[in-house]
Image: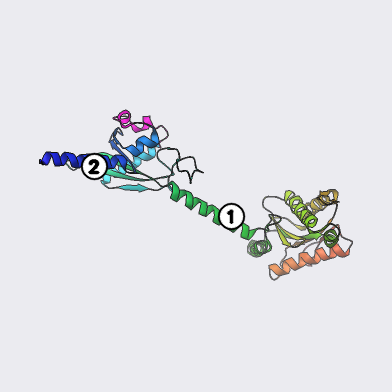
Amino acid sequence: MAINELEAQSFHWLVDMLESVEVGLVVLDLDFRVQAWNGFMENHSGITASKTRNQVIFELFPNIPEAWLRRKVDAVTLLNTRAFTSWEQRPYLFQFRNTRPITGTDDYMFQNLTISPLSGSTGQVEKICIMVYDVTDIATAKRALEQANELLAKLSMTDRLTGLLNRGTWENLVDAEFERFRRYGHTTSLVMFDIDFFKKVNDAHGHLAGDEVIKHTATTAKDSLRSSDSIGRYGGEEFGIILPETDAEGARVICERIRDSIEKSIVQTSVAPIQYTVSVGISQLSGKPENHMSWMQQADEALYAAKKAGRNRVIVHQSPDLPD
C-alpha cells in the first residue's frame, strides 16, 4: 500500500472520529470565521458544516457573549496556551437545547469548554479550537444536591408546623442580639407570648384544630412584623419575637396590634370556628441581664404577669435601670 494511501486512510479515520465523537469541535480563524464544525455541533445547532464555513461565529449565534469570547481568545493567542472554563463560571457558550431525557428540567445544555491555540508551520497561532463538552448530567445533579442541602438546612432551622424559626435557631438569634446590645448599646426588645387556654382548645376540638390555631397565630403575628424582626415558635403554643431598634413602647404598639388582630379573628377549622386570645410579655434590654437567658426570663415574667392579670393583654417588664 502506498504511503499516500495510508495517509489518506489515516486522515479519513481522523475525520470520521471527529464527526462521531460526543464532543463539540469548532475551529475558528483569528477573525472568528468558522473553519471546522463537527457532527456534534451540527446535531445540536441544526446548522450544517457547509453553512457555517467562513461565517463569523457571532453572526451565526448572536447570543454568544462576544466581548467575553474575544478576551478569552486574545489570551490564548497571546500566551499560546489553552484556557478552560466550566459551567459554574458560565453555564454555556452555545445556547443549545437540553436534549437529555432524564435531566430535562433545565432548558439549555450545560457546557465545559477548552479553548486551544492551533499554530502554523511558523509556530505562530493561526487558528483557535473550541471543544464543547456536554456536562448537563453533572451540572444538574450537583445543582439538585445543592438545592437538597439548602432545603435540609432550612428544615433544620424552621418549625415544620408554622414555618417559623424553631426554638434552637431563634434562641441563637436572641443570644446574637444580646451580644450586639453589649457591644453597641442599640435599643432592642424581646417578646414572649402564648395562646390563652390552649389546652381547652385541644380538649374541646382536638389536636388538628389546635394545630390550625397555632398556624393562624404564627401567620397573624408574622404579618404584623417588619422584615428586620425575628419570630420563632418557642414550644407548643408559645412564641418569641426579637424587635431590634425598638424600645418598650414601640414593642407595645406592635404587640397590641398582634393581640387585637388575633382577638378579632375567627379560625375556621374543620371541626368548628374558634375564637381565642393571646397574652404577651415584653422586655426592653438594659444593662442588668447577665446573659440572653436572663433577658428571656424577664420577658417570660412579663408574660406570666399578663396571664395573672386576666390574660388577653400586653405587659412590659419593669426594669429598674430603665426610665418609667
- Closer to the camera in the image, 231 or 205: 205
The image shows residue 108, relative to residue 142, as above or below, that is above
Q: Which residues are magenta?
A: 47-64
| Colouring method of the image | rainbow
Binning the other alpha carbons within 10 Å of mark 2 as few (below 14), some (14 to 19) or many (20 upward) gives few
Circle 1 residue:
151
- Closer to the camera in the image, 152 or 178: 152
Circle 2 residue:
14
The image shows residue 195, relative to residue 47, as above or below, that is below
Q: Quadrant of the N terminus?
A: top left
- Closer to the camera in the image, 155 or 186: 155
At which x and y percent is residue 83? 32, 47
Q: Quadrant of the C terminus?
A: bottom right
Residue sticking out furthest to the front: 1
Amino acid, disc 2: Leu
The image shows residue 80, relative to residue 174, as above or below, that is above
Residue drawn at x 47%, y 43% as measured from the top left: 101
Q: Is 63 in the magenta?
A: yes
At which x and y percent is residue 178? 67, 64
Residue drawn at x 82%, y 60% as measured from the top left: 202
Mark 1 and mark 2: Cα distance apart in space: 48 Å
Labelled pair 1, 2 in contact (Cβ < 8 Å) = no
